[in-house]
Structures are given as structure tokens and as C-alpha cells.
Amino acid sequence: MIKKEMIAMLLAGGQGSRLGVLTTHMAKPAVSFGGKYRIIDFPLSNCINSGVDTVGVLTQYQPLKLNSHIGIGIPWDLDRNIGGVSVLPPYEGNKGSEWYSGTANAIYQNLEYMEQYNPDYVLILSGDHIYKMDYEVMLDFHKQNDAAVTIAAMPVPIEEASRFGIVITDEERRITEFEEKPEHPRSNLASMGIYIFSWKVLKEALIANQDQPGLDFGKHVIPYLHNKGEKMYAFEFNGYWKDVGTLNSYWEANMELVDIIPEFNLYEEYWRIFTKSEDLPPQYIGDGAFIEKSIIAEGTEVFGEVHNSVIGYGVTIEKGAVVRDSIIMSNTHIGAGCEINKAIIAEDVNIGNNVRLGVGDEVDNDTKPNIYNHGLVTIGEKSEIPSGLTVGKNSVLVGSFELGEFEGSTVPSGKTLIKAGERR
């Protein structure tokens, strides 16, 4: 039998509905980040940098882009005969087809995959956070304490603590209580959704709770083990960790990359972030172009101005166009004379000439103000925006449009325009 000390199970099936149109056709972990990466690159790179060479990636919602990005794991050195990366979608068993109904249910449905490696420990990860963590250090902590479970936790402002699973510990960091999203939190140590389980403990807990609807780690497995009196410890993490689950937090995390001294540094030699790279020529900066404080990926041609922005690969920014405080994803074309302010423009978009995005007063979005806010303009993938259009703040456009569709060639702030056949 193959024997691995620790394997990782990476939960990457999330829909990411709070990212609006960015996740219409892809799972949240597949969304572009930092110009050339996808969100899932960060936990995958953490695995290989931590010496974890066996990773099961559990997919479910819109997995096509994610699957083709991961492939057989070559960019992360995870193309191995024994171990490596395996994509694990839900499948039809002898009891019929069953979708993953909760985080722990997804792991339970893959007990057979884990058993083939006979691991001592199982690392459970989420595929949608931006951070660098050495899981080996966490494993050492787990072993030192002879723990059944170790939960990675980080201090958060106490006023935000009710959004998280909160752990209460003694001075040895042993968890004495666990509260899932408490109204009145008694600690500010928030669970990061990163767990190391001793394999026998995890297996027993999943089998014992298999019939729980929507079987979840925070709601079911952790309380079950706590009630059994199993030794549970909190591993405190004080590095950069960002949940990019909303459009604004996603935009902020990208903008933090272009700070003069970035809090999250993509350029560290000893902790590289690996990704599937396209075979593209270098960037080209045209005569008269101007770029400041920005990330520009390979194959991009800039003839206009770019300020404080993150530009993906294969993008063209024509002469006279000015891009500020924006994220422009790969293979997008920005026409001549455009003015782009605080926009998130998805992949394969064509913006005509003299288009103005993000102008005027801020007005609440007319359909989903909880998603489209903070003055951002969001353009969904493969959209066509006609020359001469002006678009206000907190608006979202998806589809191919013509100028004649818009009164006064303007989309007022707060508008949602999603063409038939496109989903939000």
C-alpha cells in the first residue's frame, strides 16, 4: 500500500455568488487574480512549497475552466506517478448520483480516494483565499500537541468576529470552545477553514455524521469531536490572508498588489506562486504610453495610460485610453480614447473607442446592491461595449450591446444590464 504522511483535500467547488457576473461561467477558485494567476494557484502553491505532494481538488460548480487550468498539475510540480494532483468531481455511485452538499460531505464522498494513500494526517483547505502559509509548520504544531484536530485561526477585529467560526482557547492554545458565527463573540480568533486532522479521527467523524444534511466542518464535525473530548488546538496565523469573496474585497486585494510596499508580495523567491502560464511574447509599451504603479502581464500591449491597475495577459490598451484603479483580465481590448475608472473587466471583452466607465454620482445598484457597490463598474466576460458609451458607477453589463440601445449614449449609475441568455 502507498503511504503518505499528509495529503491535502482542496475544496474548490464554490459558486462564489457574491462575485456576481465574474462567476457566471466558472467556479470562484478559477477567477483571475493578480494579472496572471487564478485564485486556486495560492493554496496549490502553498502545498508544493510546504512539501505536500498529494492533493485532491474537489470541484462541483462550473468546473470546466478550473479543470483545464489544473490539468495534470505540471505548473505546481504535481504531475506525479504516486500522488500528485487529482480532480475529484461528484460522481454517480451505486446509490445514485449525489452532489456535494456541504464541505465535510464532499470529503466524506472521497473517503476511498484518501484511503489509497493511508495517510497519517489530512489537510483540509479552501480553494478561494489569497495567502501564503507553510503547512509543514502547522503539522509540526499538530504533532507536538498530539492533537486530533488543529484549526488554523487568525485574530480579526472583534466587531467582525460574528462573521466567522470563533475558537476560544486556553494559554496552551487548546480549544476549549468553538462557536459558529456567534452573535456576541467571546474571542477574536477566527477559524480560517484550514484544518489538519489525524486520519483515523477524521474518518470516524465523517462516518458517524454521514447522514447529517449538508454535512459541514464548522457546524457538525468540529462540534462532534469537541463533544467527544478530542484534543483540538488552534494554530495562530498572523500573515496576510484575504477572503476575496465579494467584488470589493477582490478589487481591494488586487489593488494591494500594486502598493509601493505590497502587504502581499508576489515577488519572493523563496515562496513562489506557480501557475499555468500561457506561451506569450513579452509586454510591449508603445511610444508615448505611460504606466505607473501597475502590474502588466505577458503579451499585453499598452499605447495609452495605466495608473494603479492590474492588467492581465494578452490585453491591448489603445492610444489615448486612460485606465485608473481597475482590473482588466486577459485577452481584453480597450479602444482608443477610453476613460476607465475603478472597473473590473472580465476576460475576452471588447471595449470600443471613447467609452467612459465609472463616471458620475454613486447610486445603489437597481438589482443587487449587496454585490455591485463601492462605485465599481463590472463588465462580464465576452461582452462587447460599443464606442461612445458612458457608464455610471455601481453598474454591471454583460453581453453584446449597440449604441442605439442606450438613450443619450449613457448607462446611468446603478444599472444592471444582462442580455438574455446570460446569467448573473
Image (cartoon, rainbow, N blue to C red):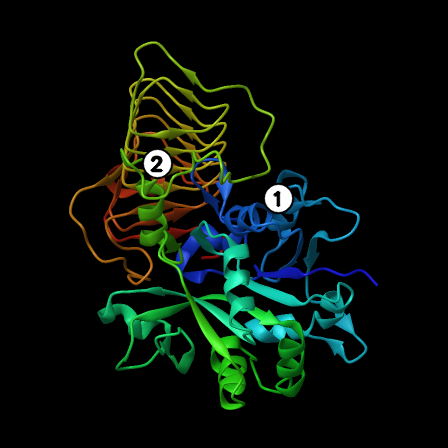
Q: Camera-side residue: 34 or 390?
A: 34
Residue annotated with mark 2 = 403
Is residue 1 positioned above or below 202 on the image? above
Quadrant in which residue 289 is drawn? top left
Q: Picture coordinates of residue 255 (x, y %)?
A: 31, 41
Q: Camera-side residue: 244 or 142?
A: 142
Instruction: Please give left or right for residue 29 compared with residue 173 in the image.
Output: right
Whether residue 62 appears in this view of the structure is yes
Residue at image coords 62%, 53%: 52
Q: Picture coordinates of residue 238 (x, y %)?
A: 35, 57
- Quadrant placement of the N terminus: bottom right
Q: Picture coordinates of residue 325 (x, y %)?
A: 27, 37
Dot 1, how many residues are within 10 Å of its Cα: few (below 14), some (14-19), or many (20+)?
A: some
Residue annotated with mark 1 = 69
Whether residue 420 appears in this view of the structure is no
Q: Picture coordinates of residue 29 (x, y %)?
A: 52, 53
Which mark lies nearer to you, 1 or 2?
1
Residue at image coords 31%, 55%: 372
Dot 2, how many residues are within 10 Å of its Cα: few (below 14), some (14-19), or many (20+)?
A: some
Q: Earlier in the sequence, mark 1 or mark 2?
A: 1
Query: Which element is circle 1 on?
Result: helix
Label 1 with label 2: CB-CB less than 8 Å: no
Which amino acid type corresponds to the residue marked 1 in the rendered image?
His
- Quadrant placement of the C terminus: bottom left
Count of all numbered marks drawn on residues in the image: 2
- Can you tell which mark lies on residue 119? none
Question: For the view shown, which residue lies furthest in the front direction?
Answer: 144
Which amino acid type corresponds to the residue marked 2 in the rendered image?
Leu
Q: CA distance from mark 1 to mark 2?
A: 36 Å
Question: For the view shown, which residue lies furthest in the right direction?
Answer: 1
